[in-house]
Structure formats: C-alpha cells, structure tokens
C-alpha cells in the first residue's frame, strides 16, 4: 500500500469505527446511521475517490480506493461505497462529471448487455445491480459508450441479496441519459467486469480478516470442557485452515488490486490477476464462512451476533460481476487457448 | 489479541527478467542435449553430477552467499526465479538442492571459518551433496526425542545411534545432523541436542537403503558406530541446537518447491485438453490456475519479506501447509478433469503416465520437511491460540 493509501485507509477506518461499528449497526432499529455514515464518507472525499478533482471527486489513486474498500470490507459496511467508487471510476474514464450522492453501475453481470439507441436513449436489462434501489444515479456501459442515468428513469424490481441488501434487476426502456460519452479504448464490458471482480475480492479479503480476528478472539474466550476451546487441537487446526483461506484471499485480492493500479491496459496478466482474485476470494469466502460458523457454534447463527453481517455479505459478493464458476471457465479457456507451452510463462509473469 | 497476517505485495524485481531468460535458455539446451526429460520426472535419476557442475558454473548454487565463499551476493528473489524455473522443468537438482537451500546457510551462520572456506565453494561449484540427519526410528516430527548420542572424547565426539528416512545419504558427501550431547532437562525438553557437520566418509558410518513405495532409492538408514567427529565440526552452541532453527526455516517452508512438485500433471492436463476444452474441464482448470497463481503470489511475498529482513514465520508455515495440500490433491483433480478426454487423443497417454507417478509420490508431500499437523500447530501458536 502506498503512503497516501495508508492515510486514506486510516481516515476510512476512523469514520467506520465511529459511525458504523458492526455491533451498534446490528442493534440499530432503523437506518438512521446510514445517512450519517454516508455524509461523513462523502465529506472526507472517499465516495468519489476515483473521480478527478475537475470532475467533482477527490482524485485519489486507484491504490487508495482499493485501500478504502479493504477497510469497508473489515466493517462489512452496508452502504453503496464500492458501487459509488466503481461508478465514479467508469464515468471518469469517459471524462464525465460525477454527481453527488450514491451511485451504482450497470451491467453488473458479464452476460447482460445494454445498448445505446440511435436516438440517444438506452435499452436493455441489467440483473443483480447492487444497491440500485438506494442509488440516485447509475453509471452505465452500453457498447462503447458510458452514460450517466437517473435511477428514477429506470424500472427496478424488488430483489435483495443474500445479505438483505438491494440487488435489483434494472430495466432500461429507452431511457434518456443525463450525459453520454464514448468509452476510452480498452474499456469494454469484460474490463468493467474485471474491475468489479477486483473490488469485490478486496472487500471479501477485508471481511475475512475481520472474521479471523473475531473467531480467534471467540475461541480464546469461550470455555467448554473446563478450558477455552482454543486449547483443543481440532479447533486450532480449523483456525489454522481459516488463516490459510484468509491469507489466500488477501494475497489474491491485493495482488490484483496492485496489478490494476500499475497497469495501463487490461492485458493477459490483468486478466489472470483479476479472475484469480475473484475465484480464489470466493472460494475463501465459502470455506472461511463455514469454519467461522463452526467455531462460533450456535451463537454465531443468531441474528444478534455480527458474524452473519460478514459471512452473508461476502457470500453474496461471490455472485456480483460474474461468479467464480463463470470466471474459472473463462480463465480455463484462456489458458487452454494459449497452449501448454505458454501456461507457465503466464503464471510467472505475475 | 490476534497476530495479524501480513502478505506484502512484492513483485520480482526487473533484474529477474533477464535471469529468467538465461535460466530458460540453459534448461532448453540441457533438455535438447538429453540430460533430462521435463515431462517425466519419474524417468532417470533425480541427480546428475555433471548437471549440478554445469549449474554451479552458471553461478546458480549458493547465489545469495558472500563472494568469498563462492557465492554471487545476489538477492533471494533472484534465487527464487532459478528455483521455480528448475522445478517447473523437472531438472535433476537433487545433488545440490539441499545444500543450496539449507545446509549452506547453516554453515555460513555456525561453522568455523576454515570449514566454510573448505566446503562452501565446493557447494557453489555443484560438487558436493548434503543430507539432513534429523529423523530417527523413535523420533520424527518430535525432533527433540532424538537419541543418537555424541560422547565427548579427546579432540572431538564419538557418535552412536541410527538416523532414518535420510534422503540422499547414499550419495551425500556430508550430513548436517542433530545428536544428543546431554539429556533433556525438566524445565526444557528441547535442551541437550547439538548440531554437527558429518563427513560421510568417516569410519563407523554405514548407509543402508530403504526403498520407497515407488521403487526408488531415496531414503536410507544411517548407522553410527563410534564414528568420530572433530570439535570443529560442532555447529553452534553445544546442547543448544533448539535455539538455532529460526528464520531459515521460513525459506525452507515457503519456496516454490512447496507447491510445484506435481506441476507437470497440470501442464500435462493443458496439453491433453487441447485448445477447446469442454466447459467442465475449462472451469476445473481455471480454478486450479487461480489457486496456483495465489499460492505463488503468497510464496513470492514471504520470500520478499524475508529478503527485506522481516520474519514471516506464520506466513511461511501457511504457504507450506496450503501449498503441499494443494500439490498433493492436484493429481486426483487432474485425473477427474481428464476423465472424459477421448482415448485416442495423443497427449492422453503421456498424462496417464505422469499421473501414475504423481499419484504414487503424493502422500509424501504433506510429510516431508514438517507435517501438516505440525505446521497447523505453528500457525495456531502464531494466531495466539496456544
């Protein structure tokens, strides 16, 4: 992480600790905390970190934005921060000004397509758009154009993710965008999906770091058979495996974030880094959630415990921007097409 | 409080690119000359005196060591590149690998200067082979149960006892071994073992083969009967060997050899599947590639942190635990993914043969150099559970 990245991450951590403590959020009867948190994040310039100053943002580096997302993952933050960052990034790449307020982006699945009609309107359907219901604007990629759209102009269904957050099918019926600009060369739908993959991987890694910490703490506190359960070898080995999964998710996610932050184009190396991050962090989410729940026992299965805020969120993130099976098939086909002799050189180039 | 895990984002530095090209060119020439077969690690010997000498002449053994001992003072990430390219090619490195990875560094730290000047340059030249004398019939993972005894005599020590599962002992010039110089104390059961440099030509040492389930001769039983070790072959503190296993262990645990030992079945799968695999094979292959990439990035990270002077003990153990479990499962995963490849397709037969060998050697991967169980205990301690 760069020096500015760590400063930005500290700012984010302070805001989340003050306004989005998972225990307090879990006990809250209404969503009032969300407004306060969002305002603080926006005031600190974190929501539009990936938007240059001349377009209304705070002009942070890509690495800084990923650092913010790692922190957001550690707090399992139930606000559209990642979505707004991504939308801001997409708009900025096309030179469009980013509006204030929460945003999301469409499409959010690799198979969905939007088109820009000859009359300048947008058509098509985007499924599983995270937080669409809570977003004032959507950044949309339609072919080789980027558009800013008011969410109110689209038709939304009532979908929710595994974590109970909005995950809506957004239908564009000849929607007139607020602004349109051509996407820069190389920014196509696969590139947008890969960027989304890395964002979700980084959030997952952050969530897993928090899960490891809370699970180790619980194992040291909980007494059974007259000693802390951390003293049982079977529990120790489960936690060692959890540490391995957390390590894999962290490494794959932060490696891909680092690679994207340094790269100019979405080349073969970025493709491997980003798909590997999505695949491996999703696998780690699955394994890690299972171990954390096993160690916590019944208390971890209750609504009042915060474990589910992390596990359900990262399990639902697996499905955004293409799930791990989709990208595994894509990566497998890519490696097969390059051939056996070009396989190791690709791995060694990362 | 939990010790937090750190995997710094480390990329191999630019000087590694040129080195990698050089290493690949060298290996291609060796393969063309018939030194070894990259696709069949089970064929031929895993060691070759001539090959190790040529590697030494290239400056790729002991390459991080001081120049006065024959080293090249290059960094650990450069050594990493050499190690991974050799491993992926299945090059016959057995003769020099142990000396390069662990015996040499221990000598540099603990041997008297004249011993270093005698042995280290010969390691760098690829001329000497080292074995590791740890396990005994009653002492495997429980290292500190070792009983082979060193009794003080005039000018040195007399060794009596038996080491077992000793790889390379039949071809080794030297062994680094743990011998009991005192009984353990009540307060510290690890007390009383001393590390020795053993010249395998010493009278009183007998090496008996123990054949492995593959039929290969790698293991040995090494019997000591009043074998004399001179005082200057004591390495480090008498009775205090337990203090000496520190950060070098992380190099031993986190290298590319800890997840690439069965790599050939994965490249064999890519070859057998061809350029248009069915969706099931493509998805399975993609997951394996993602897992391999992640393990390699973890391993590079640990090596880079070591190079930077950090001590990623837990992270190194995690790499070995996850890497060896992965490479152990790999042959069967590949077997499943290859199940529906048409019989007549050309590379299928080669893959079958690779799988035969990989399946046979798979069980050892999570045992050698520290079992999964021991590693998970170390990780648990690092997490603050023990």
Image (cartoon, rainbow, N blue to C red):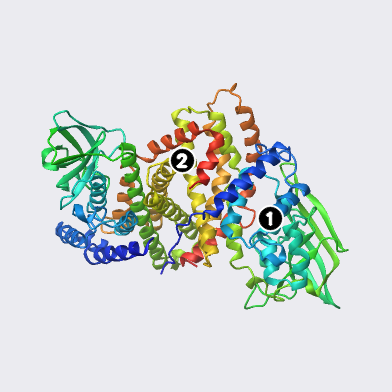
Q: Earlier in the sequence, mark 2 or mark 1?
A: 1
Q: Nearer the viewer, residue B84 or B16?
A: B16
Residue B170 image offset from top left, x and y in percent: 80, 53
Task: Name the quadrant containing residue B203.
Answer: bottom right
Mark 2 burial class by Cα count in 10 Å: few <14, some 14-19, many 20+:
many
Q: Is residue B385 left or right of residue B157?
A: left
Which chain hosts label 1? B
For this orientation, the residue located farthest to the right is B203
Image position of B280 with respect to B45: above or below = above
Which residue is labeled 1 in the image? B59
Q: Is residue B145 visible?
A: no
Q: Is residue B259 visible?
A: yes
Residue found 72% across the figure and 54% down from its top:
B56
- State which chain disc 2 sits on: B
Q: Which sits in the foreground, B75 or A204?
A: B75
Please rate how many residues cluster around mark 1, counting C-alpha atoms within 10 Å: few if below 14, some from 14 to 19, many from 20: some
Local secondary structure at mark 1: loop
Q: For the point 14% across and 42% down, which residue is it?
A: A151
Give x and y (percent) for residue B237: 70, 76
Q: CA distance from mark 2 to mark 1?
A: 37 Å
Q: Nearer the viewer, mark 2 or mark 1?
A: 1
Q: Is residue B309 above or below residue B318?
A: below
Give the residue displayed 48% in from the left and 31% down from the top.
Answer: A337
Q: Nearer the viewer, residue B164 or B234?
A: B234
Circles 2 and 1 on the same subunit: yes
User: Residue A190, image x and y in percent?
Assistant: 34, 37
Helix, strand or loop for disc 2: helix
Residue that mark 2 sits on:
B287
Q: Is residue B294 left or right of residue A308?
A: right
Residue A176 in the image: x percent, y percent?
Answer: 12, 36
Residue B146: give its label. Answer: none
């Amino acid at each position: 992480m760069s020096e500015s990245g760590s400063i930005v991450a500290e700012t984010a951590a302070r805001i989340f600790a003050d306004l989005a403590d998972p225990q307090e959020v879990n006990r809250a009867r209404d969503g009032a905390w969300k407004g306060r948190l969002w305002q603080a994040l926006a005031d600190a310039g974190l929501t539009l970190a990936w938007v240059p100053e001349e377009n209304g943002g705070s002009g942070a580096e890509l690495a800084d934005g990923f650092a913010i997302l790692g922190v957001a993952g550690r707090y399992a933050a139930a606000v559209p921060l990642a979505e707004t960052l991504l939308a801001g990034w997409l708009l900025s790449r096309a030179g469009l000004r980013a509006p204030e307020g929460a945003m999301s982006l469409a499409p959010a699945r690799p198979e969905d397509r939007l088109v820009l009609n000859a009359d300048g309107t947008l058509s098509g359907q985007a499924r599983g758009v995270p937080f669409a219901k809570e977003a004032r604007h959507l950044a949309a990629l339609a072919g080789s154009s980027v558009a800013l759209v008011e969410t109110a102009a689209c038709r939304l269904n009532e979908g929710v993710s595994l974590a109970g957050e909005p995950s809506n099918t957004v239908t564009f019926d000849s929607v007139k965008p607020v602004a349109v600009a051509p996407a820069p060369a190389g920014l196509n739908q696969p590139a947008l999906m890969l960027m989304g993959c890395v964002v979700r991987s980084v959030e997952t890694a952050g969530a897993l770091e928090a899960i490891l910490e809370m699970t180790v703490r619980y194992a040291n506190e909980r007494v059974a058979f007259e000693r802390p359960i951390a003293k049982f070898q079977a529990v120790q080995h489960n936690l060692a495996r959890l540490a391995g999964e957390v390590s894999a998710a962290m490494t794959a996610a932060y490696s891909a974030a680092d690679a994207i932050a340094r790269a100019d184009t979405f080349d073969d190396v970025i493709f491997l880094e980003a798909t590997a991050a999505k695949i491996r962090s999703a696998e780690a989410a699955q394994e890690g959630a299972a171990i954390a729940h096993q160690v916590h026992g019944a208390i971890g299965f209750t609504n009042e415990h915060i474990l589910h805020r992390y596990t359900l969120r990262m399990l639902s993130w697996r499905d955004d921007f293409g799930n791990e099976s989709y990208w595994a098939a894509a990566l497998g086909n890519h490696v097969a097409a390059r051939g056996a002799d070009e396989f190791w050189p690709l791995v060694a180039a990362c | 409080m939990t010790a937090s895990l750190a995997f710094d984002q480390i990329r191999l530095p630019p000087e590694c690119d040129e080195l990698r090209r050089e290493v690949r060119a060298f290996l291609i020439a060796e393969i063309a000359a018939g030194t070894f077969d990259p696709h069949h690690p089970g064929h031929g010997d895993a060691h070759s005196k001539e090959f190790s000498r040529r590697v030494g002449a290239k400056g790729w053994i002991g390459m991080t060591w001081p120049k006065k001992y024959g080293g090249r003072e290059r960094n650990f990430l450069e050594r990493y590149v050499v190690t991974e390219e050799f491993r992926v090619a299945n090059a016959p490195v057995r003769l020099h690998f142990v000396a390069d990875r662990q015996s040499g560094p221990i000598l540099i730290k603990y041997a008297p200067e004249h011993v270093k000047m005698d042995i280290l340059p010969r390691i760098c030249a690829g001329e000497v082979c080292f074995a590791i004398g740890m396990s005994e019939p009653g002492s495997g993972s429980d290292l500190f149960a070792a009983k082979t005894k060193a009794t003080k005599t005039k000018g040195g020590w007399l060794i009596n006892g038996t080491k077992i599962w000793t790889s390379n002992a039949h071809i080794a010039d030297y062994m680094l071994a743990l011998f009991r110089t005192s009984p353990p104390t009540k307060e510290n059961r690890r007390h009383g073992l001393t590390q020795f440099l053993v010249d395998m030509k010493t009278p009183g040492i007998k090496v008996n083969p123990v054949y492995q389930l593959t039929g290969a001769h790698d293991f040995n039983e090494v019997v000591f009967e009043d074998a004399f070790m001179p005082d200057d072959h004591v390495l480090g503190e008498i009775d205090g060997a337990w203090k000496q296993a520190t950060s070098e262990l992380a190099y031993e645990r986190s290298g590319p050899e800890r997840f690439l030992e069965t790599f050939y079945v994965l490249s064999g799968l890519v070859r057998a599947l061809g350029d248009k695999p069915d969706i099931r094979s493509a998805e399975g292959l993609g997951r394996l590639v993602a897992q391999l990439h992640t393990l390699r990035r973890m391993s590079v990270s640990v090596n880079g942190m070591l190079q930077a002077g950090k001590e990623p003990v837990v992270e190194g153990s995690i790499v070995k635990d996850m890497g060896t479990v992965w490479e152990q499962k790999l042959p069967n995963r590949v077997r499943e993914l290859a199940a529906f490849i048409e019989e007549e397709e050309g590379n299928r037969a080669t893959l079958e043969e690779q799988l035969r060998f990989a399946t046979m050697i798979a069980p050892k991967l999570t045992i050698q150099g520290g079992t999964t169980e021991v590693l998970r205990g170390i990780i648990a301690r690092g997490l603050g559970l023990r």
